[in-house]
Image (cartoon, grey):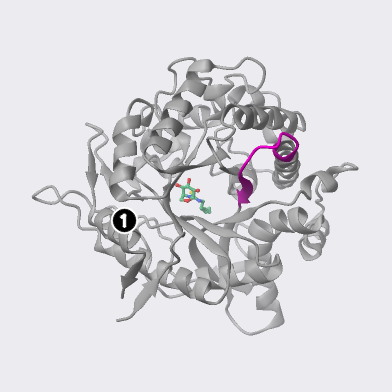
Amino acid sequence: MSIHKFPQDFKWGVATASYQIEGAYNEDGRGMSIWDTFAHTPGKVKNGDNGNVACDSYHRVEEDVQLLKDLGVKVYRFSVSWPRVLPSGRGEVNQAGLDYYHRLVDALVANGIEPFCTLYHWDLPQALQDEGGWGSRGTIDAFAEYAELMFNEFKGKIKHWITFNEPWCMAFLSNYLGVHAPGNKDLQLAIDVSHHLLVAHGKAVKRFRELGIPGEIGIAPNTAWAVPYRNTEEDIEACLRIYGWSGDWYLDPIYFGEYPKFMLEWYEKLGYKPPVVAGDMDIIRQPIDFIGINYYTSSMNRYNPGEAGGMLSSEAVSLGVAKTDIGWEIYAEGLYQLLRYTADKYGNPNLYITENGACYNDGLEQGGRIHDQRRIDYLAMHLIQASRAIEDGINLKGYMEWSLMDNFEWAEGYGMRFGLVHVDYDTLVRTKKDSYYWYKGVISRNWFER
Ligand code: NCW
């Protein structure tokens, strides 16, 4: 047993996303998003689930903020539904949508919780998708307009902003692997989407500075660590490509103004390249205030030109460790390695763990308790690595557990539960799990023993 300590000003929090929790999909003027369309298309989401009602958080601001307050978090990371505030993606503003976020932000601030706002967590207005979505440059300016609206509206109230959550998912999972909305399978389109979202990110950051918005702004890329199967150049490079297409592909242009050469060469060899227009890289290369790290899992990889279903010639082999209920391998050491890599590569910037958590589908037991000891173990393991990183001088400033409550787990539907709070989807009753009480203890003491 030893004690794992965190700094006094460490920002403990939890995270959620609009489409996963809000529901009220067609109320008060909200426009449709690509996730409404996707989830309403038979066969796209397990069990035919959709976010029409989700956790009904749109109607439960007070109840959910009370859960946050009881938990003792310092920050709450949520995302804004773009089509709720701009139903057509640009142009006419939906005041009722803005009012919802004002109610939420005001309640957070009144309870001493700092809002940490993600502008885009995957719910693109369908109206923009109809014009080509992220595959079209038109969406770049629409995003900049939306970002500016939010900055002006919440100036001084929201002091932490994230432009994009997990750009790899937006680009590759959604447009190359076809697993998420809008469900395309086109590698060039995925590369185009990556580039356009980076330019949109850069434009938003530029506007943020020009408008003199107080606070900080960053991005939260997908990050996963990959361990080489053998200590050979081929296997090491196969691992670098895994991190290359999900992390470096986004962070290198932001920090260095250029795509990682080894990935550019890889794509070019396959006949693909990003659609860079003169001036783009200067826009993308805006200084940001922090990097958000979303970390869940790692993989072991080896070079295999015959890799099934992929184009990186990087085959995942099992690490041989336990998995969470969604099938992701548990590898806490990978979190440390990733923090180390990111800190070393980008000049020890401020980092927040913007997501980390575990899917375990434990249900209510007699007496109304949920004994999710496996989630507690998962969190403890990863927090040990976080505290180790801080001790080693990495500028890790906060930790946001995913997620406050069970919610709509995208293509997996409601069957996969990540919450500290259990949600009964028939009654929408929220029940605190054992992990909620454990995390509350960690936050209140700023240390834990393991
Ligand atoms: S799906 C996903 N997640 C989960 C989600 O609830 C959250 O909104 C996301 O930010 C938990 O954290 C993120 N990430 C995508 C993981 C990749 C799945 C790879 C499938 C390969 C076919």
Query: What range of the chain is rendered magenta?
Result: 208-220
Residue 154 against residue 118 in the figure, above or below: above
| Residue type marked 1 | Tyr
Is 342 inside the magenta-drawn segment?
no
Q: Which residue is mark 1?
A: 360
Looking at the image, residue 412 sits to the left or right of residue 91; the answer is: left
322 vs 221: above or below: below
- One can see residue 120 in this view: no
In the rendered image, residue 403, in percent from the top left (x then y), is placed at: 39, 49
The secondary element bearing badge 1 is classed as loop
**Residue sitting farthest toward the right:** 278
- Report the number of numbered marks: 1
Please provide percent x and percent y for residue 184: 63, 39
- The residue nearer to you, when weighing 205 against 380, is 205
Occupied quadrant, residue 330: bottom left
State whether residue 243 is above or below residue 326: below
Q: Position of residue 306 (x, y in %)?
A: 65, 66
Using the rendered image of the protein, determine whether residue 77 is visible from the camera's viewpoint. yes
Q: Is residue 111 left or right of residue 124?
A: left
The x and y percentages for residue 312 are: 68, 62
- The residue positioned 64% from the left and 68% from the top of the image is 343
Q: Residue at x 81, y 55 (%)?
A: 257
The quarter of the rendered structure image containing the N terminus is bottom left
Image quadrant occupied by the C terminus = bottom left
